[in-house]
Image (cartoon, grey):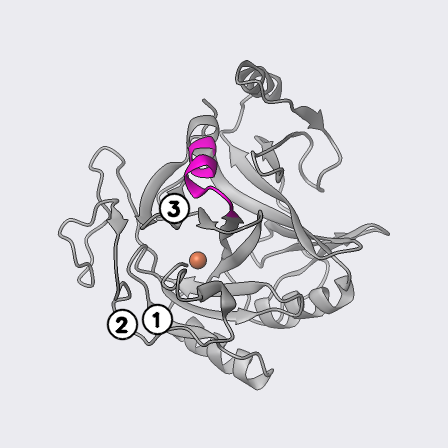
Amino acid sequence: MIKVKRLRHVSFASRSVEAQLDYYRSIIGLAVIGRDDRRVILGTESDELTLVLEHGSASRLTAIACEVAPGLDLSDLQKSLASLHITSEIRSDTAPGIPKTLVFNDPDGLQIELFSSWDFCKPVEPIRGLAVAKLGHVALYTPDPERTAKFFGDVLGFRVSDRIEENFVFLRCGVEHHAMNFARGAEARIHHLAFELRDASHMHQACDLLGRNKFQILWGPVRHGPGHNVAVYHHNPDGYLIELYYSMDLMLDEELGYFEPRPWHHDRPQRPKTWVGLPRDVWGVGPAKEASEFSPTMRGVK
Ligand SMILES: [Fe+2]
């Protein structure tokens, strides 16, 4: 089994790359690392590649890139995938600073990219906006959350952190409660993208910046149940739900099997479980009706 260590960056196709670019620069606080006719590549203030925006005829998530342990030979990982009847290829053109990438598809057809060696990529312009800490997690709709979660577990080494009834699965690949989430939906597409903030003052700054720029806050600030992150949600110019959060649960020791104790936990200790019924959130009111991602059947999903 391959062990993914970190979620690293995502790629989107967009019909309006320039509008997306303005949003990610002025609100989220990423900055351009490089660009060509086909795409624009953005990074964080920590010089980590975070987002690839490609020109496309439709707006959609096209790939998720994850890091595996340094020194791993991608051709060995390719053999490991082949033994599971998963076809893959090794490419050298996926992103700057990443010499080789192992590329394959998940069961829903989403492109997964794995790499073991990379360089920091310094932005070529000043950071503006919120200067988020990093890309935190990606939530996807999938017709069968358990099947997709099993693929990420069996093939990529993700562990289940929590479930919400039969509708949502949270997976971790490091110490943070979730790097990937799978929500039940008719078709495979993005549910939301989450960026990490530093702390409560950064959250306050985020709410002020969203308000000043007429981005409606659709949910939050709220402290969730699963993951216990403090989160706020809005739609970006392509209509995707974006979450900004801080203070997520950490499982520092897998053998202990519980999340670092926090006073807001309901369970002592807080172990992975299936959350049933409402309320799940520790505090905060429910989502606005404009957030269709949180329709009554999906309410509480995050
Ligand atoms: Fe989330």
**Quadrant of res 229:** bottom left
- What's the CA distance linking mark 3 and mark 2? 21 Å
> How far across and how far down the image is residue 193, in percent?
53, 57
Give me the residue at 27% from left, 48% from top: 274
Give the residue pinned by disc 1: 222
Give me the residue at 58% from left, 59% from top: 45
**Name of the residue lying farthest toward the left:** 268
Q: Which residues are magenta?
A: 142-151
> How far across and how far down the image is residue 145, in percent?
44, 43
At label 2, which amino acid type do we have?
A: Trp
The image quadrant where one finds ligand 1 is bottom left
Of discs 3 and 2, which sits in the foreground?
3
| 145 is within the stretch colored magenta | yes
Q: Is 275 or 51 nearer to us in this picture?
A: 275
| 7 is within the stretch colored magenta | no
Q: How many other residues sit within 10 Å of disc 2, few (<14), some (14-19) or many (≥20)?
A: some
Q: How many other residues sit within 10 Å of disc 1, few (<14), some (14-19) or many (≥20)?
A: many
Question: Disc 1, disc 3: CB below 8 Å?
Answer: no
Left or right: 4, with 161 as reference point? right
**Quadrant of res 284:** bottom left
> How far across and how far down the image is residue 47, in percent?
60, 52
Examine the residues drawn in magenta and state their main secondary structure: helix
Question: Disc 3, disc 2: CB below 8 Å?
Answer: no
**Quadrant of res 236:** bottom right
